[in-house]
Each structure stands twice: as C-alpha cells, then as structure tokens.
Amino acid sequence: MKFFVDTADIDAIRDLHALGMVDGVTTNPSLINKSGRDILEVTKEICDLVEGPVSAEVIATESDAMIAEGRKLAEIAENIAVKVPLTWDGLKACKVLSDEGRMVNVTLCFTANQALLAAKAGATFISPFIGRLDDLNMDGLELIADIREIYDNYGYETQILAASIRTANHMSECAKIGADVATAPPGVIHAMANHVLTDKGLAAFLKDAEAAGIKIV
C-alpha cells in the first residue's frame, strides 16, 4: 500500500520522505490555510520535494470553473493530481481533465455508488473518507471493502485512496482490505511505530545493558 501524507507542512513531509515513507501528498484548502502560505507557492515546493502525486484541490463548484482551476494547478508540476469534489460538476470536470491526460483525485466520497461514478468518469484516484463515516457511527472500512470489490469485478484502474484516516489501526485495516493508497496526517504515520510492549522491552534491555556495563562504541 502506498503512503500519501495529508499535510502542507513542508518540514513534516521532508522528515517522512527521508525515511521512504512518502509516495505522494494530499492537500486541501483547510491544510493550505493552516500552512499560512500561498497555494501555488507551497504546492510547487511540495512537488519539488516529492516524486509521487501531489493532490491540489480546486475551490470552484461549477464544472467549467473547476476545469480552468484544474488546468492552472496542473501547470505547477507534472506530478500534480487535480482534486475535485464528488458532485455532478466535479465528475464533469474529472472527465474533461482525465481525457486531457491529467491525474484527477475525486474527493469527498461516502458511498460505493459515488466511487463507481468516479471510475466511469476516469478518475485516477477515488478518496473515500473513513473517519467522517465513523463519526456518524457508520463503518468507513466497509466502504473501502465495497469499492475494492466493485473495482475488482470490472477491472477499473481507479486507485482507492483511503482518506480521513484517524488512527494507526485504520492504516493496517486499509492495507488488509486492499486499498491502493492511504493518506494520513504525519502524526498517524508516526504512531504506526508505537507499541507499549516495544517501549517496555526496550527499557528492560537498556536497564540490563547498563547493569552489565555493555558498551559498543
């Protein structure tokens, strides 16, 4: 499973990229706002740092305006994936942009029917939001499984990009189900390395090493 980092924080991206943990980046207006930087400037810097797809989201709601914004964003770098919402206008924009050879990430997906429409429209990525479904006492992971089954049934090439990831458990469950990509905040990716037994075991080893006077260098 590919790891995308859901942030516009350059330092956080650089840190994970150095460890080989970044296959791409996703951004949205909220993350850009949090960075406090111009969307074109920060997106260009991310694209220069990361080899894989970098999702940059349109803010228009009407298809023609989405297409114009998508073309503008795609000029930033070759690895831009234009991010459009899963509305009918968003699907129209997806079709046009994908036909032009641009990567398109269709976001805010909450049903298998929506994912099927996005695949038919030529989406490169479909972004089902796990955490937001969980917030409504619905099973976000079940949606990932449903989309995986449908796409496999018909050989759709659209990649399932599991989004709205809240926990390290979400990451491993998405991997077991067969999501192509999971995008998560840097903190969630770091949390994947944590376990109380790892901490306890390391503390015991260090205590014994100190007692034995063990030194390596």
Image: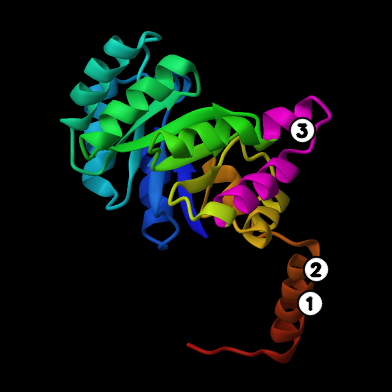
Residue drawn at the location 38% of the way across and 38% of the way down: 122
> Which marked residue is nearer to the observer: mark 2 or mark 1?
2
- Whichever of labels 2 and 1 marks the residue nearer the N terminus, that label is 2
Q: Is residue 195 magenta?
A: no
Stretch of the chain drawn in magenta: 131-152
Give how far across and how far down residue 21 sits, in percent: 45, 58
> Picture quarter containing residue 129?
top right
Disc 2 target residue: 197
- Whichever of labels 3 and 2 marks the residue nearer the N terminus, that label is 3
Tell me if mark 3 has few (under 14), some (14-19) or many (20+) residues whose alpha carbon lies within 10 angstroms of its own: some
Q: On the rendered structure, is 151 left or right of 55?
A: right
Q: On the rendered structure, is 56 left or right of 142?
A: left
Tell me if mark 1 has few (under 14), some (14-19) or many (20+) residues whose alpha carbon lies within 10 angstroms of its own: few
In the displayed orientation, state which residue is furthest to the right.
137
In the displayed orientation, state which residue is furthest to the front.
154
> Picture quarter containing residue 55?
top left
How far separated are the C-alphas under marks 3 and 1? 38 Å
Q: Nearer the viewer, residue 108 or 188?
A: 108
Kindly identify which numbered label has been placed on residue 204.
1
**Amino acid type, callout 1:** Ala
Disc 3 target residue: 134
Give how far across and how far down residue 139 sits, in percent: 78, 38
Q: Is residue 152 visible?
A: yes
**Amino acid type, callout 2:** Leu
Tag 2's secondary structure? helix
Residue drawn at the location 33% of the way across and 45% of the way down: 53
